[in-house]
Amino acid sequence: MAAVVSIAWLPAPAMGELVDAFGDAQDVLGQGPPLLDIDTMFIFYDGSFLHFEVTFHAPISAPSLGQPDGVVGNLAFDTGQNAATGSPPPQNQFSPPFATLVAGVDFGVDLFSEVGHPGFVDVVDANVVVVDTVPISYGPMSFSGSVPLASLGGDDGVVDFAVAIGAPGQATDATDVVGTSELASVPVEDITWGSIKSRY
């Protein structure tokens, strides 16, 4: 049996970017493949939006397409950067094998919700109340989108973040540490989505 790993809710060394280990996806509920495996999660902000992109080591699809590799899960945002407020990160319910994060999640992006309105996902608060619905784009091995800062309680864009994902029917991967969003250094329209390393 795997040991519980406790990770503090602290900024990761690389601001705005979390790189997840290759091959660490888990068959949590014994459902078998596909075991969706996170590559990188990147979060940055400008004056109006919090932008996100998550890439994977293998192909994914939108859950509304009904395919086995449809990616579901949650992006967790601690806008107050305060573990005493909000809710525990969703991945904690699958710990072990996922790392236990000490955090106060104030808002999140519900990837499951894309099934109900293809091409859009719900933004929820700590009580899982929908506060906004925003567009999401899927590439062969990534997804990306933007959340208005006004929908995050008027936040300034500086958030701690983590992600837990899975395929329909089970969780398969989650970030082991947390990151802190980064101020965009170039206009959003100049960023190449679908490849984290080409964003600048």
Image (cartoon, rainbow, N blue to C red):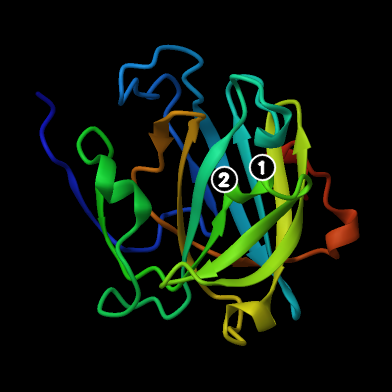
Secondary structure under tag 1 reads helix
Query: Which sits in the foreground, 88 or 50?
Result: 88
Crowd rating for badge 1 (residues with CA inside 10 Å; few <14, some 14–19, many 20+): some
Query: Which sits in the foreground, 50 or 60?
Result: 60
- Tell me, yes or no, if residue 152 can be seen here: yes
Please, is residue 28 above or below residue 42 in the view?
above
In the rendered structure, the answer to whether residue 1 lies left or right of residue 106 reads left
Answer whether labels 1 and 2 touch (C-beta < 8 Å). yes
Q: Quadrant of the N terminus?
A: top left
Q: Amino acid at mark 1?
A: Val
Q: Amino acid at mark 2?
A: Phe
Residue at 36% in and 53% down:
90
Q: Which residue is mark 2?
A: 112
What number is the disc on residue 93? Answer: none
Q: CA distance from mark 1 to mark 2?
A: 6 Å
**Residue 88 image point, x, y percent:** 30, 62
Residue at 47% in and 12% down:
33
**Residue 125 image point, x, y percent:** 49, 72
Please, is residue 83 above or below residue 26 in the view?
below
Crowd rating for badge 2 (residues with CA inside 10 Å; few <14, some 14–19, many 20+): many
In the displayed orientation, state which residue is furthest to the top.
32
In the displayed orientation, state which residue is furthest to the front.
116
Q: Which residue is mark 1?
A: 115
